[in-house]
Image (cartoon, helix red, strand yellow):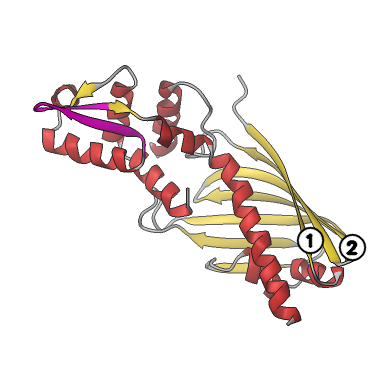
Amino acid sequence: MTASDYDRLFHALADPTRRAILARLSLGPASVSGLAEPLGVTLTAISQHLQVLESTGLAATRKEGRVRTARVAAAGFAALEDWVAQHRALWERRLDRLGDVLDEDDG
Amino acid sequence: MPDVIHDTFVIVRTYRTAPERVFAALSDPVKKRRWYAETTESYDLDFREGGRERAVTRMGDDTPFPGAAMVAEAIHQDIVAGRRVVLAQTMSIGERRISVALITFEITTTDSGAELTFTHQAAFLPGADGPAMRKGGWELLLGRLDNALAD
């Protein structure tokens, strides 16, 4: 995950409707209409939110016949737990960059 | 149940250069900025025990806090010339403190140059978006997000 991947992940979670969708999906898969009605938003809005959630690995959807069903996906949430581990990766990059700077100065 | 996440890691690097040059990359503001704070909006370094280091990064439009300042501020705790630097650092986004860390650089001499041992011991604080999320339970995760993003 790059820094911009994390930005997109946090952006996906920053919307309260998307968080409400994930809360509902945490109880089990649901259809798009099954999500829209209790949240009081349009089918189009739910589809757009699901697109964002799918693109960041937080949810997955599948079409069966004419019904699109959504479920939570593990990848996005595992990435959040990796946030702490990413600090190590950040410092690894910085210390690599230090090596480059030392080489530039010595050369 | 305690909700601060503690994390410690160590990175060791060898550099084909004199140990004094590695130390200079920690003590000279121009040199340090080139590898530590290349893309920050501002960077200041007062290299002495009790001296402050401050790096400010502006959050982009595609983050949850567009335009907010992410500030990494540290005070040098211990300096042994050529050999050791210890800093205590806080990181904040806007008004919210995300983490507090103890950072140690140790430089030793090797046959081919210098070895740098970097130790990072951090406390990630609750209420911070993302970093302080605990494992297990969608409801806990989403409840924390609701609190953290409500302001």
Do tag 2 and tag 1 residues touch (Cβ < 8 Å)? yes
Instruction: Indicate the amino acid at tag 1.
Output: Thr
Please check the rendered image and state whether residue A60 is part of the magenta-colored stretch, yes or no.
Answer: yes
Front one among A90 and B81 = A90
Q: Position of A14 compared to B117: left or right?
A: left
The chain carrying label 1 is: B
Q: Residue at x 89, y 65 (%)?
A: B81
Tell me where residue B50 sits by quadrant: bottom right
- Pointer 2: what residue? B110
Front one among B111 and A7 = B111
Q: Which mark is residue B107?
A: none
Which quadrant is the N terminus of chain B positioned in? top right
- Image location of residue A74, percent across then percent down: 41, 30
Q: Residues within 10 Å of mark 1 (few under 14, many from 20)?
A: some
View extreme (left): residue: A66
Q: Position of B63 compared to B32: left or right?
A: left
Q: Residue at x 55, y 62 (%)?
A: B56
Q: Residue at x 18, y 21 (%)?
A: A38
Q: Position of B47 compared to A74: left or right?
A: right
Instruction: Indicate the amino acid at tag 2.
Output: Thr
- Pointer 1: what residue? B14
The chain carrying label 2 is: B
Front one among B94 and A85 = A85
Which quadrant is the C terminus of chain B positioned in? top left
Q: Residue at x 68, y 75 (%)?
A: B30
Asked whether residue A42 appears in the rendered view, the answer is: no
Tell me where residue B40 sits by quadrant: bottom right
Q: Point out the tag, 2 or 1, that comes first from the N-terminus.
A: 1
Q: Residues within 10 Å of mark 2 (few under 14, many from 20)?
A: some
View extreme (top): residue: A27
Looking at the rendering, the stretch of residues picked out in magenta corresponds to A57-70
Image height of A43 relative to B72, above or below: above
